[in-house]
Amino acid sequence: MRKQLWEVRDGQMRLHLHPGQQRAWRSRRRFVAMLAGTQGGKTSFGPHWLLREIRDQGPGDYLAVTATFPLLKLKMLPEFLNVFQHTLHLGEWHASERVFLFHDGRTRVIFGSAVNPESLESATAKAAWLDECGQDQFRLESWEAVLRRLSLHQGRVLMGTTIYNLGWLRQEVYSRWLAGDPDYEVVQFESIVNPAFPRAEYERARRTLPAWKFAMMYRGLFDRPAGLIYADFVDIYREEGGHKVHAFDLPPHWPRHVGIDFGAVHTALIWLAQDPQADIYYVYHESLSGGKTTAEHAAEALAKAAGVNVLTWHGGAKAEVQQRLDWQAAGVPVQGPSLDDVEAGIDRVIAMFKHKRLFVFDSCRGLLDELGTYSREVDESGQALEKIRDRESYHRLDALRYVVQGLQSSRTGGIWL
């Protein structure tokens, strides 16, 4: 009979960890990522890791963050309460505040959702447990919010997830670990490393699923998923054959071009510099902000443009005429698109990547995250459909599409509307 993950004897909890969990438990690095197959024992492991951190670090605030609040209620919270409240009786769960308060009155575990990064901003935490942080809803901004909350105490992080995309988790964590960064540890294991996972189910998935999906869902390995729109973008450095470049000082005389995605909550700007001799473009700066007037956004853009050779500004869909007029009134001569077809704009960006005429500074982390997650929906067999998943969430990529489309239209004599 297979043992449960833990048992209590004489008031003491004893863990029975499988090899993948043991590797994560032994690691004392600051950022530990468990990238594992489905049902590999990631979520059930998290409460025990967090409890050890609380005992090591002492009273204070701690974070437990998952991709969405429905997922919190379904997986993360029941596992946590089973250990902290029902078994060890360490405190009480306060649902209205999404806080677990220890009996000592000095220790809290604050639960948050990645789709609402603001829920994480009030705490100064000593450690964080992130569950299913590889899901599309868990964006770079949420990861950065967690890091800000931990910065004072230089708190540790446990990340547990199945792999879903090639976004920030691969770029910010996995790539750093591969490069030998001593702060990072990645533990990868297959679903069947968990002795409770049926071998027959694993073999069924191997036989029936596309190879990329089996690798990501059951083996904990990164692969290029079907439906990834910018699959021609290679997320390695140019000297290795990819499209990333280390940030460098740009000659001030190089022409610049700016793409703008308008939004009351999220306004995104993407800045391109053109090497006129090689006819190569570099994305060298990005921004995403909200809560400002058009005049304030425009003033910041003009300040950024001071001292450099900005030739063109491109922004918005064809119907966003008023937004362009507002920016123009604020001093930014934003031009509209020559056509209003999203797919045509995507094709133009892809062509730039294919012909190695568009590169991205590694400092543009938000754009890199979007490039690794911007996907079409897929059917049950893993085949890509036409519909773009969560298309309204990719503001930086929209800004990139506007500026690339504008550049190519201007070259072919397109008419600005």
Image: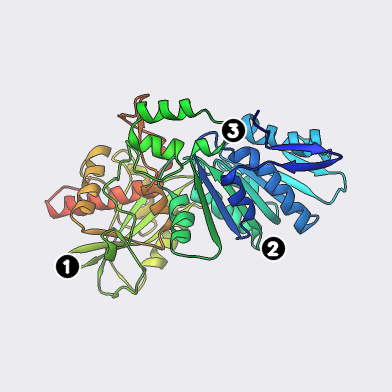
Residue 350 in view of the camera: yes
> 306 or 219, which is in the foreground?
219
Q: Residue at x 30, y 45 (%)?
A: 230
Give the quadrant of residue 287. Answer: bottom left
3 or 1: tag closer to the N-terminus = 3
> 128 or 248, which is in the foreground?
128
Residue 96 in view of the camera: no
Q: Residues within 10 Å of mark 1 (few under 14, many from 20)?
A: few
Asked which secondary structure carries label 2, the reply is loop
Give the quadrant of residue 15. Answer: top right
| As drawn, 11 above or below 142 | above
> 31 or 66, which is in the foreground?
31
How far across and down, in percent of the image, does residue 248 sit? Answer: 34, 72
Label 1 sits on residue: 278
1 or 2: tag closer to the N-terminus = 2
How far across and down, in percent of the image, does residue 181 sit? Answer: 50, 65
How far across and down, in percent of the image, does residue 111 sit? Answer: 68, 42
> 222 or 70, which is in the foreground?
222
3 or 2: tag closer to the N-terminus = 3
Type of amino acid under label 2: His
| As drawn, 391 above or below 62 | above
Give the quadrant of residue 284. Answer: bottom left
Label 3 sits on residue: 71
Judged left or right of residue 377, residue 218 is right
Type of amino acid under label 1: Ala
Mark 1 vs mark 2: give the one in front.
2
> Separation of disc 1 and disc 2 at Cα?
47 Å
